[in-house]
Image (cartoon, rainbow, N blue to C red):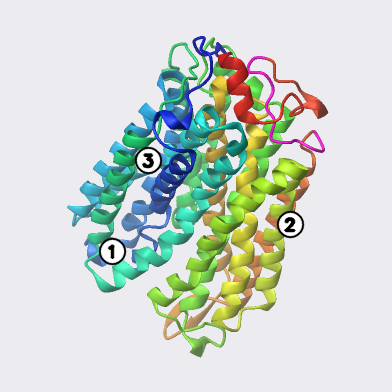
Amino acid sequence: MPSSTAPPPATAPPTPGAKGSANVIVVILAFSGIVTALMQTLVIPLLVQLPVLLDTTAANASWVVTATLLAAAVAMPTTSRLGDMFGKRRIIFVNLGLLIAGSLVCALSDSVLPMIAGRALQGFGMGLIPLGIGVMRDVMPPERVASSMALMSASLGIGGALGLPAAALVAQNFDWHVLFHASAALAALALVLIARYVPESPVRSPGRFDFAGSIGIGIGLVCLLLALSKGADWGWSSGSTLGLFAAGVLVLLAWGWYELRTPDPLVDLRTTAKPQVLFTNLAALVIGFAMYSMSLIAPQLLQLPRETGYGLGQTMLAAGLAMAPGGLMMMLFSPLSAVITKSRGPKTSLILGSVVIAAGYALGLVMMDEVWQVIVFSCVVTSGIAIAYAAMPTLIMSAVPVSETASANGLNSLMRSIGTSTAGAAIGVVLANSTLTFGGVEVPSLTGFRTGFAIACGAALLAALIAAFIPGARLRGAAPEADAAPDGDEEGEAGEDLAGTATRTAG
């Protein structure tokens, strides 16, 4: 197990005043999280055009999305552990530096190989979000911790939602390279603001970095996610797909065996096996699935011609703008989740968010005839996502030592990413197997869309059921002492807030 050594003695942890006010820190870190999350959907409006733009095949062009996904999966647990060891703010600079480098590579590319390399570098920026959550726990005033972490956690979904209309606007009116010049500029701005206003966390988890564990989880995740993302193209029964699935499972089993026996593991599996952490991570996976289903289905429904009988005939830009209110709803509802968490506990917030997501998809089954109806049910879905996502850091942090905050949230973010990857594969199969021919081209049918919504609705209800098994009826955002996190129904009752833990540890 990794060392849970407390930070060096001090009279109190640093206050936001050492760099900037609490409000400034929250805004800057949330902005930075949104910038990195934009990379999820940055090229989705360009997918149809990419083979022509990059002079390649559609199969090769799809790696422009896959590369980002795989890099993010590897980055989250690795950079989170490095942040716990060497300083979260310091590793955030590395994340943003890689994002800037990747954006510049893409901005200067006109062929597929450098574009894939640049998109992979952009994916490493995703490790910023769990690190930002950890910084907030460590340096924010106690009364601001829950709401701050809620917004930071929700930034993963906010960035994805806002990325669609922003990318569509640029792609339809400017040269596509502008997307990457803009992402480099935004990441550079985030880096400067963090350097100027955000303090470093004093909390460290000393020990040696687990290089073998990092390589092992990277290989295992790449095998699994590659099989999920490319299975539809290669064939689910092909040797490549089945071989990758088998290799991924075997590598991850060997990785788990190794992690349980090394003194300084990349991921403390004993901590993640606690019911509160385990069930929260399982719920994160399923909610990630439900979240990405909206991004896959709604834009296609909006853009298909009205002549199909169910398409809404919108342009790429109009479809993107129709999805934008969902991102705004996430910004509005993440603070509400903090209020619910404070009064009823994060478990209640997670269950409520999951039920709201399911209700949104249920509305989608019967509200598909007009653009405004799509906007309404997408806003309901994204509101639920905001509530659910915002509750997860409090559940995680009330069960892990303070020295493992970034690592634990990195694993939680990874589970969300695995959920989105699974959604891409599963919903893609559903839509590909329920089509009709329009204008000589096969397009998803109305039945396919409804089946996709029904699956996403079921996934959200499954998340609510999983969340119901999280121990403790009222977790008030509290955290146990750094080295003595209790198990069972009493978890979360050790104090009034997460930042209080940092104060007691430092004292």
**Residue 326: which quarter of the image?**
bottom right
| Residue found 46% across the figure and 39% down from its top | 73
Q: Amino acid at mark 1?
A: Pro
**x then y, percent, for residue 80:** 47, 29
Is the C-beta separation of discs 3 and 1 under 8 Å?
no
| Residue 366 badge | none
Magenta: main secondary structure: loop
| Residue found 75% across the figure and 44% down from its top | 343
444 is within the stretch colored magenta: no
**x then y, percent, for residue 50:** 29, 63
Mark 2 Cα-neighbour bin, 10 Å: few <14, some 14–19, many ≥20: many
Q: How many marks?
A: 3
Compare marks 3 and 1 and give the one earlier in the sequence. 1
Which is in the foreground here, disc 3 or disc 1? 3
Tag 1 residue: 51
Q: Amino acid at mark 3?
A: Gly
Tag 3 residue: 125
Instruction: Identify the secondary structure beneath mark 3.
Output: helix
476 is within the stretch colored magenta: yes
- Does residue 372 sit above or below 426 in this rendering? below
Decide if residue 114 is on the left or right side of residue 62.
left
Q: Which residues are magenta?
A: 472-483
Tag 2 residue: 355
Foreground residue among 218 and 156 = 156
**x then y, percent, for residue 491:** 76, 27
Instruction: Identify the secondary structure beneath mark 2.
Output: helix
